[in-house]
Structure formats: C-alpha cells, structure tokens
Amino acid sequence: MSCSNMTMLVSSKPSLSDASALSFRTSLSPFQAPPSHSPTSAGSRPTTGPIQCGLRELRDRIDSVKNTQKITEAMKLVAAAKVRRAQEAVVNARPFSETLVEVLYNINEQLQTEDIDVPLTKVRPVKKVALVVVTGDRGLCGGFNNAIIKKAEARIGELKQLGLEYTIISVGKKGNSYFLRRPYIPVDRFLEGGSLPTAKEAQAIADDVFSLFISEEVDKVELLYTKFVSLVKADPVIHTLLPLSPRGEICDINGVCVDAAEDEFFRLTTREGKLTVERDVVRTKTEEFSPILQFEQDPVQILDALLPLYLNSQILRSLQESLASELAARMSAMSNATDNAVELKKNLSRVYNRERQAKITGEILEIVAGANALT
Amino acid sequence: MTLNLCVLTPNRIVWDSEVKEIILSTNSGQIGVLPNHAPAATAVDIGILRIRLNGQWLRMALMGGFARIGNNKITILVNDAEKGSDIDPQEAQKMLELAEANVRKAEGKRQTIEANLALRRARTRVEASNAIS
C-alpha cells in the first residue's frame, strides 16, 4: 500500500502534537519490536512502523481498506461463478467437437487412397505468417494478458530472425490496445471477444483467417492463446491452425503433434470446500462405422464442408480456454488482494487501537498531573 | 426400426431424439431419409431440414455443415441451427430485407460473396419460420 501517501498525510499535519506522537512511539516501540505478524507483510512496509498518522486518518484508511476488500472479494466470487459458466460452455461444445473429430478421422481414412487436393491442407513454402493473439478484455487478472503478449513478442522476434514476414490478428481489448500503441507491428485486424465466446466470434476469426490463407496472403496461421491447466496455472501456447493436417492432428510450433482425438477437458469441482480443477484426458473412441459408406458428393466437397467446421471448433475451443484462464487468473489475483487487504486492515486497526489507548492514557496522566499540581 | 436424429452445433445439442423421417437439403439437392437408409456422408447446404414426427412436419434452419447417416442414426454437424418455432417471423423478414439491400450495395468480389451468403441465411430463416409448408 502507499507508504508515500502515509508520509504525506503525516507531513501535511506537522503541528499536530508532534512531540507527543513521537514520545508515544518511543514508548510503544518495545511492544512493536518483535514483529508478530508474517514476514511478508513486514517486507511490504518498512519495519520501523510507518503507520504514524493521526487517529482520524487511520480511521479513514481502515474504512477505505475495508471497501477495497469488499470489492476484491466480490470480484473474486464473480470470477469463480464465471469460471463455472465457461466450463459449462466447454462441456456443451464437447459432443460437437467429439463427433467432428471422429467423422474427420473416418472420412480421412477412406480418402487416403484417393488423391485429394483441399486448399486448407495445402502446405506451401512459408513466406508470411499470421499470428492470432487471443487476450482478455479486462485487466485486474494478474499477469494473464502480459504473459500472452510476451509470448507473441517472442514469437515475432523468432520470425524476424528467420527473415519471415508476419501479421497479427488481435482478439481481445487488451491485445488491441497493446498493438495500437505499437504501430510498427503490422496488424491485419482487431477483433473483440465477447463476455462468453460463441460460435459467432469464432466464425469471425475463422472467416478472416480463411480468406488470408486461401488468397495466399499468408502461408501459415498460428494461434496464440492461454491453455487452461488448472486454477493456478495457465500456459500461453502456440498452435498451428493452418494448414490443417487432414488427419485431425494439431501440431505445436516444435512440430510435436497432438492428436485432436485425444481430447482434454477441464472440470471445476469442489473438494473439501475448496475449488479445484480436474482435467480429464478423454480418448475419443473412433468407433467403426460401416465401411461401405456412400458419399453423396465428391469427397473433396465433403472435406470442404468439414474442414471449416473443424477450424471453427478449434478456434472456439481456444477462445473458451483463454477465457477460462483469464477468469482463473482474476480469481487468484483477487483472492491475493483480499488476503492482503485483510492483513493490512488488521495491522491498521492494531495501530489505531494502540494510538487511541495511548492518547487516553496521556489525557488521564495530564488530568492527574494537573490535579496533583493543584493540591 | 426407429431413426435417431442428432443435430449438433458448436454451442449445444439442438435436437437429439427419434424421428420418423427427415428431408435434408444437401449440396446436390434434397434427400429424404427413412429408417434403414444406406450409410452415407454428405455436405449440408444452407437450407431447411424437415422433420416428420407424429404425423407433423417440423422445420429447422441449418447454416451449412455436414451429415452422416448410418445404422439408423443421423448425425448432423452444422455451424448454427434454429428451430422454425423459435424464429420470430417478423424479425426474420426484416433481416431478409436488410440482406437484400446489402446484396444490391455490395461492391467487389469478396463483399458480394459475403452478402449473398447472408441473403441465403436470411431466406432460409424466413422459410423456416413460415409454419405452412
């Protein structure tokens, strides 16, 4: 908390019984010398006891800390409730993505023998890369937005070293303002995520990415988002979005391929009164279905219809993960802030009570001394 | 034999229950599906899905995707789907007029394609909202 503010408060009232305050402090110092509270709070403020404002200032500060604590606590609860909603959205999207991967797998197996040419899977020599950077819309969530932007900057540096061109598609208000402040970074489009990502937002991103790739403006599209690992851990990751690998695999930047059929999803549960996250790895069973499948249209046309759906669901998933990470980051940040506020309030009220008592003692002493002098 | 229909969108499951018969608009025209249909895979166009249930025909607007038929189970994966009864006819009509105006205004290839797509979506919604077939 603002120590400078405190000293300013003190210095603004230098005439206020300066000597007496000093004497109180010296008389109190033996009690204060062994810092009974945790070392973290002692580290955050000088150990010499900087809380030395008048009684009224102390009262005001206690009130203001109390209000801040209420706000941070409310934000924490709201974030916790929203994490649940985000998780529900992921669960709701599951049947779709599961079936999609399964179908893609099956059809691909049947199409292996045929020589097909689908534009979305075409691997071209890479000259220009599009980076889709997914950030949050709001701050107050710890290092969440910074982490993903730092990752993006690192990736941009790598691309520059390789001598490749790049362009950014920024999703989320925080990323937008960051890239707007840096006009030397080429940005293709700014998009804003909603409060809850829906297929519509994913569609907008997919459309943009699609047209960039098809028109051969870019040869590779990478998606940077924050993977939700647990309530306290979230990793910024890079996924190659396009060209799609027709087997339904997503490759990250190191060429490590994750089979999309091996799908994870997270589940928020309560254990012994505390929120925890379970992450399930679900191996989607690619169930056998009739080998004599009849294609109503050309296989190419069918893949053409399927791959955009797949692209959409990938983007939607990353948006959902990113939102969940943001909310989790906000939850822990706000929980820390609440803890700090409680600590600060405790310290402040202790000092307040001491000072009040000291003042009363002083007054009694004065009266007794006065009465003694009279007699 | 019963026929099971499952309509999935990225957000939710729109339909998952038994039906008697469906008519699906695919890229190569409409196809009707009755129980014990041969296994098939097809791309689904932007268009109406008609579902026969208890002697009644229900309509659903589908916004393009993919369908798989096999083993008396139909799985339809689409970007978006709306039941005809959930669409407000007046609002849909308004959207259609807006889309028509946009098509007339569109310049350039990309805009024209986008406007035409929007028009087809709007038209499908209006069609689905009209209860009389």
Image (spheres, coloured by chain):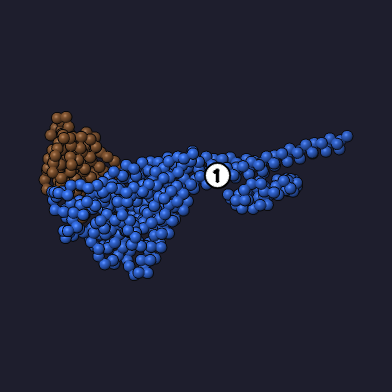
Chain colours: A blue, B brown
Amino acid type, residue under disc 1 in the picture: Asp
Residue sitting farthest toward the top: B54
Residue A152 relative to residue B41: left or right:
right
Q: How many marks?
A: 1
Q: Please name the residue shown 43% across and 59% down the image.
A: A150
Res A375 → quadrant = top right
Res B109 → quadrant = bottom left
The x and y percentages for residue A118 are 20, 58
- The answer to whether residue A176 shows anywhere in this view is no
Res A147 → quadrant = bottom left
The x and y percentages for residue A111 are 18, 55
Q: Secondary structure at mark 1?
A: helix
Q: Chain of mark 1?
A: A
The x and y percentages for residue A346 are 62, 42
Residue A174 relative to residue A209: left or right:
right
Of A112 and A230, which appears nearest the observer? A112
The x and y percentages for residue B20 are 16, 34
Q: Please name the residue shown 34% across and 60% down the image.
A: A256
Of A346 and B77, which appears nearest the observer? B77
Disc 1: CA contacts within 10 A as few (<14), some (14-19) or many (>=20): some
Of A159 and A276, which appears nearest the observer? A276
Q: Please name the residue shown 39% across and 60% down the image.
A: A152
Residue under pointer 1: A339
Q: Please name the residue shown 67% across and 48% down the image.
A: A35
Residue B32 relative to residue A230: left or right:
left
- The answer to whether residue A102 shows anywhere in this view is yes
